[in-house]
Image (cartoon, rainbow, N blue to C red):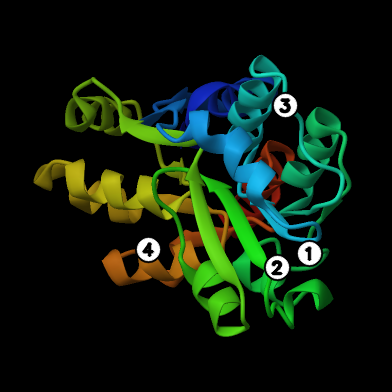
């Protein structure tokens, strides 16, 4: 098994290092870099205007990092009279450590559907929900919350910017290196990979095993052309779970 890891920044490199320690060949080639969001300067004032008991959602550790740094640099902090939520355990734990606030998250399904099933999310009349996220993302949480009575505010904490390298050539190199498994951690990454790859690499691409972090991304991959037996859904999005998916689900299937 030779693995291409597309996860951005140091988390992608960390997964590559973990695989290398297991003597598994792995290449780190992100398709995006993570940059500070344009709306970060607004965060202190947006937080201050929320009512006691309103909700704040953080979608990823990147959102946590940029939000915490912004508040720290400006002498503010996360208010203790708000309720904080995260999509998954890893982000919730990270947010708790960085912001020193209790964070609610779904125990079963670490996705928007899991969040929407939480008891706190059923009646949202007169609630304002502040979502700290990237420059794009899923709309399911916001759309459903509005139907349940909430007002939604987005704040762009970070941006995904395309990397300034020749991605088609980089992917072609991966093909020549014998890569047969690709780790995908967002639908944006999957779509970018599909759109940028050279036509002469497309058959190879669909022959690769694909490790994704949700059934939703797996469904998108199937619509693009991957066969079901080539798509492996990791139970969670953290690197340990991704590595275990690679080690046990894929190795067992081969």
Q: Which residue is mark 3?
A: 76
Which of the 4 image quarters holds residue 161?
top left
Relative vertical location of residue 245 with respect to residue 106 in this rendering, above or below: above
Disc nearest the viewer among 3 and 1: 3
**Front-most of residues 16 and 47:** 47
> Label 2: few (<14), some or many (≥20) within 10 Å?
many
The answer to which of marks 3 and 4 sits earlier in the sequence is 3
Give how far across and how far down residue 177 sits, in percent. 34, 26
Q: Does dot 3 land on a helix, a strand or a loop?
A: loop
Q: Which residue is mark 4?
A: 221
Q: Does dot 2 land on a helix, a strand or a loop?
A: helix
The Cα–Cα distance between marks 2 and 4, rounded to whole angstroms, is: 24 Å
Please give the label number shown on residue 115: 2
Circles 3, 4 touching at the beta carbon (< 8 Å): no
Q: Which residue is mark 1?
A: 106
The Cα–Cα distance between marks 4 and 1, rounded to whole angstroms, is: 25 Å
Q: Which residue is painted at 55% across and 84% down in the image?
A: 147
**Front-most of residues 187 and 150:** 150
Circles 1, 2 touching at the beta carbon (< 8 Å): yes
Q: Does dot 4 land on a helix, a strand or a loop?
A: helix
Report whether 111 appears left or right of 232: right
The answer to which of marks 1 and 2 sits earlier in the sequence is 1
**Front-most of residues 67 and 88:** 67
**Which quadrant is the C terminus positioned in?**
bottom right
The answer to which of marks 2 and 3 sits earlier in the sequence is 3
Disc nearest the viewer among 2 and 3: 3
Q: Residue furthest left?
A: 199
Report whether 212 appears left or right of 88: left
Report whether 127 appears left or right of 179: right
Give how far across and how far down residue 102 sits, in percent. 89, 47
């Amino acid at each position: 098994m030779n693995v291409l890891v597309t996860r951005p920044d140091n988390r992608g490199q960390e997964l590559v290092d973990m695989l290398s320690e297991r003597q598994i060949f792995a290449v780190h080639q992100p398709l995006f870099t993570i940059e500070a969001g344009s709306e970060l300067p607004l965060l202190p004032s947006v937080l201050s205007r929320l009512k006691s008991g309103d909700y704040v959602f953080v979608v990823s550790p990147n959102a946590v990092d940029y939000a915490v740094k912004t508040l720290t640099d400006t002498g503010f902090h996360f208010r203790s009279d708000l309720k904080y939520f995260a999509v998954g355990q890893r982000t919730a734990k990270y947010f708790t450590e960085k912001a020193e606030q209790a964070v609610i998250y779904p125990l079963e399904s670490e996705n928007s559907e899991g969040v929407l099933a939480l008891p706190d999310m059923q009646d949202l009349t007169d609630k304002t929900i502040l979502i700290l996220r990237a420059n794009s993302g899923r709309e399911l949480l916001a759309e459903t919350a509005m139907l349940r009575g909430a007002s939604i505010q987005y704040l762009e904490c970070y941006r995904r910017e395309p990397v300034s390298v020749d991605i088609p050539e980089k992917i072609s190199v991966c093909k020549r290196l014998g890569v047969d498994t690709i780790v995908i951690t967002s639908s944006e990454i999957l779509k970018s990979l599909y759109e940028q790859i050279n036509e002469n690499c497309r058959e190879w691409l669909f022959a690769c095993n694909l490790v994704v972090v949700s059934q939703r991304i797996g469904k998108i991959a199937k619509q693009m052309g991957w066969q079901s037996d080539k798509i492996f859904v990791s139970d969670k999005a953290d690197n340990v779970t991704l590595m275990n998916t690679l080690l046990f689900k894929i190795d067992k299937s081969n």
